[in-house]
Image (cartoon, grey):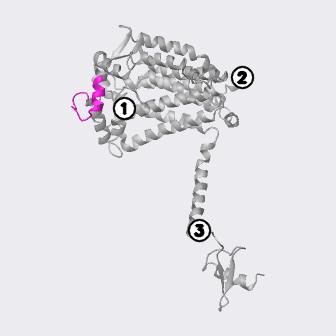
Amino acid sequence: MPGAGEQTWIMHQGVTFGDRPSAGSEVSTDGDGLAHPHPPDTGGIAPESLRALGGAGDLRTRIGVWRAPLDRPLTSYYLVLGITVLLLALGLVMVQSTASVADLSAGLSPYSDFKKQLLGAAIGLPLMWVAARSSPRLFRAFAYPLLAVAVVGLSLTLIHGVGISQNGAARWISIGGQQIQPSEIAKLALAVWGADLLARKDKFGQLADWRHMLVPLMPGTGVLCLLVIVGLLILMALAMLLMIVSAKYRFERMVGYLNQQGSVTGASWQGTQGKYAISSGGIFGVGLGASREKWGYVPESTSDFIFAIIGEELGLVGTLCVTVMYGGLAFAGLRIARRVPDVFARLAATAITAWIVVQAVVNVGAVIGILPITGVPLPLVSAGLSSLLVTLIALGMLMSFARLEPGAREALAARGPGWPLRVLSWLGLAKRRR
């Protein structure tokens, strides 16, 4: 049985402090016989501050619970896969919404460009699946052949009659009636070749000398860049002069960026109409397919400026969702680069993530007017077979690297057979396949 003083404290604990006195606290009684505890010494810290510290601890606990799924071995793998599928689906919807107008104006079926983009997705997704299940050694084996293909393709665009020019830029070649953009292949080639080169140097301990980090990586990168931009930007001052002489549209774009309040019917037309499209969308947009700016007002609305139509039709909510998805892709890619033990995979994951995310930032920045218009497509969303296929292969490589994270193989093994084997099992072909 508790003593009298303890009984008195239990009876009045809800009135006084709400807690049982600790061993170090003092209890005194007054004339009425009731116990009144003296709180223990807190070193001058007010009780309110102690309660605040306890709340911060609870907040840290909640954050830890929310972050627990992000610490799982396959988090990066599923993030890349999920974001890729979402952006690809959005791209197909927006290409159909924007390209149907141009197709009808050209006397074609309103589904003409959509069918091409859908074909690219139908080819690219299996390629991404194969890349996701391939070994990094296979990617390294293709490093130099892929680089050679990129150099040859970029060189062909410079040959008159072979390179196909659109809007003053010769960036395409035709193979079998299909236009191919070698600069997209060059992005993947540079990422794989550069990662393989630096991984080989790291194996021999040569990266301690900064010169081994630059040679031959920087000369090789310079050759690709010069082929992509046709010899411009060797030096900034010389580049400005050459842009005026050899490619007037580039100079007009630069002037339009520096003077965005200039003539809205001249070099500033595309940028002005793009910003108008985004601003007219409001919070929730005018509705999917209801854009007015895609009816000839925004040039390249299916490729370079498709983000403007997204802002008009889906509003601020739609543009923020797209931005968050690219941010999630950046998080997943850098997480893979930080966790994988293989040097080549780490370097290649960093390069691929930087390429896709920076390209998205450049595209969005050009549309909203904070960066010059450069003709860079929005990855996975803009129309274009070359960009779509190469990006899907690169993301498949990123998923392959995610399978190298600690604990990922065990988690995949515990998950059981993949969906292709399950489909074969449902069809009764799994045994026959074995």
Label 1 sits on a secondary structure element that is: helix
Nearest to N terminus: mark 2 or mark 3: 3
Q: Give 1 or 207, whichever is nearer the viewer.
A: 207
Residue 341 among magenta residues = no
**Which quadrant would residue 103 be assigned to in this image?**
top left
Residue underneath mark 1: 306
Residue underneath mark 3: 45
Q: Give 392 or 141, whichever is nearer the viewer.
A: 141
Q: In this view, does 6 lie to the left or right of 295?
A: right
Can residue 58 be seen from the camera position used here?
yes
Question: In the image, residue 203 lies at what x, y percent?
Answer: 66, 22
Q: Distance between the residues labelled 1 and 3?
A: 57 Å
Question: In the image, residue 418 lies at what x, y percent?
Answer: 64, 31
Residue 252 among magenta residues = yes
Question: In the image, residue 392 lies at what x, y percent?
Answer: 51, 26
The mark lying in front, picked from 2 and 3, is 3
For the N terminus, the quadrant is bottom right
The magenta segment is: 251-267
Nearest to N terminus: mark 1 or mark 3: 3
Residue at image point 30% right, 37% down: 275
Q: Which mark is residue 351?
A: none
Question: In the image, residue 118 lies at what x, y percent?
Answer: 45, 26
Q: Give 53 or 382, whichever is nearer the viewer.
A: 53
Looking at numbered disc 2 in the image, what kind of residue is underneath it?
A: Arg
Looking at numbered disc 1 in the image, what kind of residue is underneath it?
A: Ile
| Mark 1 neighbour density, 10 Å: few (under 14) some (14–19) many (20 or more) | many
Label 3 sits on a secondary structure element that is: loop
- Outermost residue on the bottom side: it is 31
Residue underneath mark 2: 434
